[in-house]
Amino acid sequence: MENKIKEIVNQNFEELVALREHLHRNPELSNQEYKTQQLIIDFLSKLTGVEVHKTAETGVVAIIKGKKEFYPNPVIALRADIDALAIQDEKTCGYQSLVKGVMHACGHDVHTVILLGVAKVLNTIQNDFSGTVKLFFQPAEETTGGALRMIQAGWLDNPKVEAVFGLHVDPSIPVGSINYRQGPLFASSDLLKIFVKGKASHAGYPEEGVDAIVVASEIVLGLQTIVSRKVSFSDEVVLSFGKITGGEVINALAKEVIIEGTLRTFDSSIREKVLSEINHIASHIASAHHAEAKVEVTQGYPVLSNDKAMVDHLIKVGNRVLGDEKVLERKKPSAGSDDFAYFSQMVSSCYYLLGVANIEKGINYPLHTPFFDVDPQAIYLGCIMQTMISLSYLMKV
């Protein structure tokens, strides 16, 4: 079966690479993936025996049922995110983004074509397997969490999904290898806004006002002590502030400042403790200066945690397809976040990292950067891995 899968992927490899390059030239931001959605539908509609459904406005679900008689007909799902980022593509290549200020800088174009390749393989060998595979082409991973909307639309049910697998390209890993981790892989993320209110006055008479900029500055510095003094180093907390807005003119004290940042944690109790400390420190520093501070928290994606049984399944398939020397454990979780976490909360799941780096070709720039790219060989290996993960799960081989 594995050799047959490799042969089918190899036969369609050039088409998949061309599709990836087309998507890379024509990226679309979160919740705007209409052309991407149509490309996916057009591709899948040419495959007989594949159910195709629109969902979550710009997403797609494909359902492929094996025709081989076998009980109890399990159900597995594979997920690929499809949206791009607001980053200017600065690569020099034949598939550079044609959309100003928008780029597939996180590899979602690669995720998409890998899943299309899986659809092509499964459609070709429908008579050779039993059970059901659901393919989730998910919008808005970078912003509003399209995964949750697909879950709310009922796609984990009817028939009920037993396991979900996903992958993410990783330019720190050489092409041909994968990384896995049992338990937490990606952090939860919370968006923070701290509104600091002071009192405006003439810059020449600061004693008549309360300088919100000075208060905000002290709050930012004070909050740094949370990670260094209020939690253990083993709690793995990242608290960062990337934006401060305030003031109207240079010769007046600012009456209001807004501080914005993110909190990333791997444990819900630690998260609550840190949020409590943020409120405590911000309000008391403000009060000491006769100002006010209000903390607004927008809860982001939860912790993405991998199920042990699903990780064991991944390792088994990876050792078979890539060789055990290419299947490597990631020792520490990443402070990044991903809305695949919603799937992992609902169903036994595994999310793993697919190597795409090739230093000899100069392909090793980080995610979310203007020069990010992938070695096309990763598409070939990703298709085989995701297909074999599915079939091995369904057929219990």
Image (cartoon, rainbow, N blue to C red):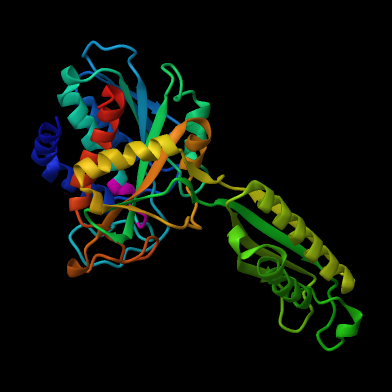
Q: Classify residue 39 by image quadrant.
A: top left
Relative to 321, is 371 on the left or the right?
A: right
Q: Out of 309 and 275, give the one closest to the viewer.
A: 309
Relative to 340, is 220 on the left or the right?
A: right
Can you say which quadrant of the picture contains the C terminus? Answer: top left
Q: Out of 298 and 326, give the one closest to the viewer.
A: 326
Q: Residue furthest bottom?
A: 204
Residue at 48 percent across and 38 percent down: it is 146
Residue at 58 percent across and 60 percent down: it is 236
Q: Out of 374 and 102, give the one closest to the viewer.
A: 374
Q: Position of residue 185 (x, y in %)?
A: 47, 50
Q: Classify residue 195 by image quadrant.
A: bottom right
Judge whether 74 appears above or below 353 on screen: above
Is residue 138 visible in this depiction of the protein? no
Residue at 41 percent across and 55 percent down: it is 85
Numbered range of the magenta stretch: 105-110
Judge whether 343 appears above or below 318 on screen: above
Q: Position of residue 142 (x, y in %)?
A: 46, 49
Q: Is residue 329 magenta?
A: no
Q: Out of 275 and 178, give the one closest to the viewer.
A: 178
Q: Position of residue 305 (x, y in %)?
A: 50, 43
Q: Position of residue 254 (x, y in %)?
A: 77, 74
Can you say which quadrant of the picture contains the N terminus? Answer: top left
Is residue 61 visible in this depiction of the protein? yes
Residue at 44 percent across and 20 percent down: it is 160
